[in-house]
Every structure is written in C-alpha cells, then in structure tokens.
Image: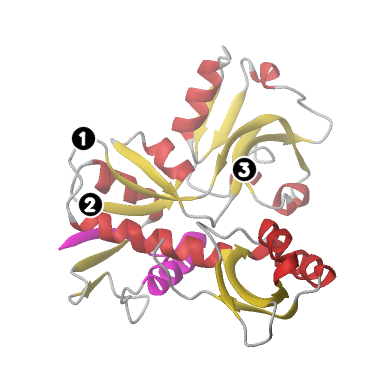
Amino acid sequence: MLKVAVPNKGALAEAAAQMLTEAGYRQRRTSKDLVAVDAENEVEFFYLRPRDIAIYVGAGTLDVGITGRDLLLDSEAEADEVMELGFAASTFRFAAPEGGLASVAELEGKRVATSYSGIVRAYLERHGVTADVVRLDGAVETSIRLGVADAIADVVETGTTLRQAGLAVFGDPILGSEAVLITPAAAPKPDAFAVFRRRIESVLVARTYVMMDYDINADAMEQAIQLTPGIESPTVSPLHREGWVAVRSMVPRDGAQRIMDELYALGARGILVTDIHACRI
C-alpha cells in the first residue's frame, strides 16, 4: 500500500482532508483516528503533526506527505517538494516593534525569536548577518515584550496578530509558503504514486476550471473560440438551427463571468457554467 502522511491538526489538516476526499480517498472518521486504511484504493493514511511529516517522509518511512513548504525547509529533511497544492498560503517575515528595525542588516548582533530556526539561520547566513536565533515552539509575538528577543520571524497571513502585539514587518519576505506534496529525496517513487499524484492534479484542475456551454452563430464561432480555447480544443457540434453551433469548453473559474459577458456580446446565447467535480487531463 502507498503510505501517505496527512496533517492531523492545524490550518493544513481540514484542507488536506478535503482535497483527499475530492480525489476519491476515504479519510478518517474522527479526529482521534491516527491511521485510516483505504483498502479499495490501496492507500494507508497516517495523521501526524505537520512539523513531523517531512521527517518521516525524508527518512523513507512514508512514501508521500502533505505539509507546508516552510515546515519542509525548516526540517532540513531529505524530502523533495513535488507539487504545490493551492491552499494554506502564507508569507514568512521578520517583525519588530513599530518604528524599530527597518532592514535585515540591522539584525546584526540582535536576538531573533522564531519557531523556524532552520529557515531563519539559513536566511541570515545568506545575507551575511550574525544574530542569535532563539527557538520557540509558539506564540513568538510575546517574546519581545518578555525580553527574550529583539525581533521575531514568523508566518504572516493577515498581519492582525502582529499589529495587536504592536509589531510591524520589515525587510523582504523570507519565504512564500503554501501546502505542498512531498516525497523522499533519495528513494524511488513507488508505482502507486503516479495514480495518487494524478488524482491530486485532477482536484487542482477541477478547482481551477469550470465547464462552459453556449450556442453561437457559426459566423462568430472563431471569435468565440478565441475566448474559450479550452485545455486542448473546445468541442463544437452543429445545432438543428441552421447556421448555429454548440460549443463546450473548459475555462478558468476566476474569469468565467467576464467570458460570459464577452460571449453574449458576440451573440452567444444559452450560456451555461457548471462545476467540474472530477477529471483526468
């Protein structure tokens, strides 16, 4: 069986489980379950702390894992990122009291508190800055007020938590992170991985595209197809109404409303948009 590591809690857990469910895999029944076996699809899921997943996958104990890019890099595990998964996006940045530090160079000789010491040390080294990196497991925002650090480095999503603590980001982003699919760096990928990856890719496509159907005069068909070229090519079928055709094509979800407006202006009618629940491209 293919052995897959899934986050057991936190921001990654629910979205990862939802993606796997959409890909047709059976997930655990309750949050207390540590293992779920999908015998029909020959996959065994192990629910682990997100921070530990890269370690298990890098050691070759598990074949595949879902974790954050930040956690993967911080672990320094022998695991490779093989696919971005499109959720849990965040930015990793330095922050200090408002009106304080303004650049990474000013961290020279300072104390930096973080839960991601591996990433921070590597970043500071690349920029020629020597600082004392203080490893904390959480709530790094309070470390400055408590006198443990002069600055922090942490994941920033909206920035609300930092502002509430009287902190402001400075310098360039350290890292852009999101959920990623990882595999062992050294070990060959098992045959079952190809099917697993294809299913995950199909979920990403289904979330990104919608199916659009419309009727249009054949004289305007080429202009319409310029708006809806599809993945490979649209499907065009003649209608009973002379001189008209029906067109079916996949279009980006984000631009679907604009495309409908432009098709209508070309004379298209009966324009319908439907969700794609599963696909293979």
Q: Which residue is mark 3?
A: 91
Q: Residue at x 63, y 88 (%)?
A: 240
Residue 215 lies in what quarter of the image?
bottom right
Q: Secondary structure at mark 1?
A: loop
Q: Earlier in the sequence, mark 1 or mark 3?
A: 3
Instruction: Name the mark nearer the viewer: 1 or 3.
Output: 1
| Disc marking residue 50 | none
**Is residue 125 shown to the viewer in this render?**
yes
Question: Does residue 4 lie above or below 76 as drawn?
Answer: below
Q: Please name the amino acid that badge 3 sits on.
A: Thr
Distance from the alpha carbon under mark 1 to that under mark 3: 29 Å
Q: Secondary structure at mark 3?
A: strand
Q: Position of residue 128 (x, y in %)?
A: 56, 11
Farthest-out residue, front:
242
Q: Is 235 placed left or right of 201 in the picture?
A: right
Q: Earlier in the sequence, mark 3 or mark 2?
A: 2
Quadrant (top left, top right, bottom left, bottom right) of the N terminus: bottom left
Q: Residues within 10 Å of mark 3 (few under 14, many from 20)?
A: some
Residue stretch rendered in magenta on the structure: 1-23
Quadrant (top left, top right, bottom left, bottom right) of the C terminus: bottom left
Q: Which residue is mark 1?
A: 186
Question: Does residue 124 lie above or below 256 as drawn?
Answer: above
Q: Residues within 10 Å of mark 2 (few under 14, many from 20)?
A: many
Q: Secondary structure at mark 2?
A: loop
Q: Please name the amino acid that badge 1 sits on.
A: Ala
Q: Is 233 placed left or right of 201 in the picture?
A: right
